[in-house]
Amino acid sequence: MERFSIAAAYNTQEMIFRGENDRMDSFSYNRWAANPADMVGDILLRDMQQSGFFRAVFSRYVIGEGHCVLHGGIQEFFLRMGKTGRSAVISLEITLMDVRERDTSKRVLMQKNYYAETVLENPSPEGYCRAMSQAVETVSRRIAGDVH
């Protein structure tokens, strides 16, 4: 797995939210423990390693071990705040490539977009964390199954 990329608007440890007017802002006193691209990539790596689908799944720090490389790009990672409630939103694109294939037109094995939105049970930063965790878990399961 390669390091995930992330859209510039979400490339921060700040907890981003969007209101009804679609204006982006962040919480003043709460932050993610790490950049969302690294958090999501690490969770997906862990989930794929534990899935039982694969003989091995290597992080970006292991060089030259695998014949397929998984690239990911986070397009959205925010809290939606609307009249009807709040929900954690994640969308990302995954590309699986065969690095042994010399013909570049045949190198891409799979490319797919994923989206999950989870309603907050508790309208707080902790509730946002729980809802985003559930959203990431949802896309992680789908990605592992699709890659398999």
Image (spheres, rainbow, N blue to C red):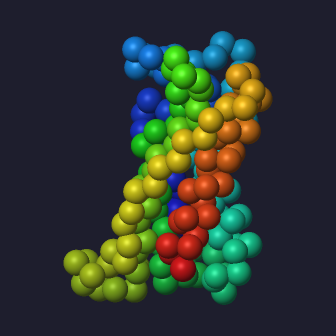
Give percent across and percent down for residue 109. Answer: 37, 78
Give residue 123's quadrant in the image. top right
Q: Nearer the viewer, residue 25 or 83?
A: 83
> Looking at the figure, which quarter contains the N terminus?
bottom right
What x and y, as percent, mark residue 4?
51, 53
Q: Is residue 128 left or right of residue 67?
A: right
Above-or-below relation of 126 to 103 = above
Examine the rendering and report whether any part of residue 137 can be seen. Answer: yes
- Please tell me which residue is depicted at 75% across the width and 27% down the height of the picture: 122
In the rendered picture of this protein, how many numbered marks are placed on residues?
A: 0
Is 1 above or below relative to 137?
A: below
Q: Residue 37: image x %, image y %? A: 56, 46
Q: Residue at 58% across / 32% down in the picture? A: 87
Report the residue at 63% width, 83% height from top. 54
Which residue is nearer to you in this view: 110 or 132?
A: 132
Q: Is residue 123 above or below residue 90?
A: above
Q: Quadrant of residue 34?
A: top right
Q: Residue furthest front?
A: 84
Q: Residue at x 60, y 60 (%)?
A: 140
- Which image quarter holds the C terminus? bottom right
Relative horizontal placement of residue 67, taking residue 31 as reference (left or right): left
Residue 116 percent coordinates (x, y): 53, 47
| As drawn, 112 above or below 31 | below
Q: Specify whether residue 62 is in view.
A: no
Q: Is residue 89 left or right of residue 125?
A: left
